[in-house]
Image (cartoon, grey):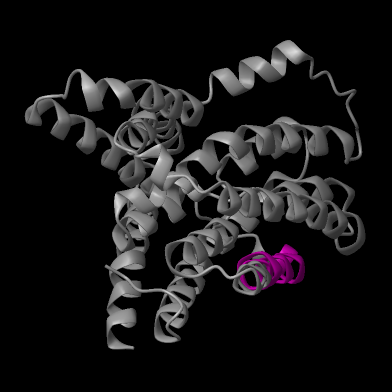
């Protein structure tokens, strides 16, 4: 139990501190919204591909990729796409609040929250399914978010998502870019050429830096000033998204015989908060951006506690052993 407690603390503690640092820098006016936006774009577009490149270039695909586990993660994700749609239709009253709630339910910030926790708890070989899941699923969820935002609201737009637009969205995703480059470099690294230690260290540092900077930008964007106007809706959503959703996912995976890293990684994927991009997309489609911002802010704060609880409980109950 003590080992599980320290494992949970060591995994979630840095997330909490980096979120708080971003929040503090914003409130002390050391950073402003424009600088945070620039920092976020830089971390996402330039640094993030290194995270996925580093993970995939050293993977042993024959041993590390488990198609059954990967399939379960994907099926659970699209189950919650349906749940998110149903939740928005039945549980959210404001017309311009429906689509932000829908996309916030099924979009999870795996890259910033789940991946660093998994890296802290497990060996790199145990993360291959998670990396491949993010490369396959995140671009599709982004496209579904656009569809829902365009469909549900006071002023609905005609959806103009052609095959070319979809292909461009997927091809330009930093997650896809880093993963594909890592897969292509994998046989080169194994049989032809290995980066010198100095260059390898730079790649690793750049990948680590992306997570830190993105967490700081999430913390800087935390704002609960308008929660009084949306309190009931935001608290209800947070409970469903941050507690019930990962709990149901965890029980399903346990029933399917999951244990160890695959069990916790699946729970992390389903239990992380919606990304900050949820807010920007809602505003762009003239939906309730304040509501979307509150969902992201409160879920980001609560997730530190809920993820800690899942890591601690699964370890204490003997379902997961940490390195």
- 157 or 55: which is nearer to us? 55
Residue 23 higher or lower than 298, as above or below: above
Kindly tell me whether residue 223 is visible in this rendering. yes
Residue drawn at x 63%, y 42% is: 279
**Residue 30 lies in magenta, yes or no?**
no
Kindly tell me whether residue 274 is visible in this rendering. no
Residue 57 screen position, x and y as percent? 32, 31
Residue 28 screen position, x and y as percent? 33, 52
Residue 72 screen position, x and y as percent? 64, 54
Residue drawn at x 38%, y 20% is: 184
Q: Is residue 48 left or right of residue 86?
A: left
Residue drawn at x 31%, y 46% is: 212
- 63 or 38: which is nearer to us? 63
**Residue 239 lies in magenta, yes or no?**
yes
- 102 or 322: which is nearer to us? 322
| Quarter of the image with the C terminus in it | bottom left
Q: Which residues are magenta?
A: 229-247
């Amino acid at each position: 139990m003590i080992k599980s407690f320290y494992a949970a603390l060591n995994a979630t503690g840095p997330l909490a501190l980096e979120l708080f640092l971003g929040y503090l820098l914003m409130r002390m006016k050391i950073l402003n919204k424009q600088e945070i936006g620039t920092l976020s774009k830089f971390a996402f577009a330039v640094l993030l591909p290194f995270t996925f490149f580093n993970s995939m270039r050293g993977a042993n695909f024959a041993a590390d990729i488990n198609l059954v586990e990967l399939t379960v993660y994907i099926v659970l994700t699209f189950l919650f796409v349906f749940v998110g749609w149903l939740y928005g239709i039945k549980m959210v009253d404001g017309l311009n609040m429906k689509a932000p709630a829908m996309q916030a339910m099924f979009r999870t910030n795996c890259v910033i929250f789940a991946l660093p926790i998994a890296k802290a708890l497990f060996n790199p070989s145990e993360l291959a399914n998670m990396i491949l899941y993010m490369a396959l699923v995140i671009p599709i969820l982004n496209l579904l978010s656009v569809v829902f935002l365009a469909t549900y609201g006071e002023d609905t737009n005609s959806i103009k998502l052609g095959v070319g637009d979809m292909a461009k969205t997927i091809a330009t995703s930093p997650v896809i870019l880093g993963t594909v480059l890592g897969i292509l470099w994998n046989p080169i690294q194994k049989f032809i050429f290995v980066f010198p230690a100095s260059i390898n260290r730079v790649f690793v540092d750049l990948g680590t830096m992306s997570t830190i900077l993105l967490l700081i930008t999430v913390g800087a964007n935390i704002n609960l000033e308008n929660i009084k106007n949306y309190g009931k809706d935001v608290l209800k959503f947070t409970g469903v998204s941050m507690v019930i959703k990962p709990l149901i996912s965890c029980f399903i995976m346990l029933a399917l015989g999951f244990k160890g890293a695959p069990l916790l990684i699946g729970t992390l994927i389903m239990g992380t908060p919606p990304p900050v991009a949820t807010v920007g997309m809602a505003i762009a489609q003239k939906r309730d951006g304040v509501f979307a911002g509150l969902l992201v802010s409160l879920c980001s704060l609560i997730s530190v506690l809920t993820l800690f609880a899942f890591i601690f409980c699964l370890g204490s109950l003997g379902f997961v052993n940490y390195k």
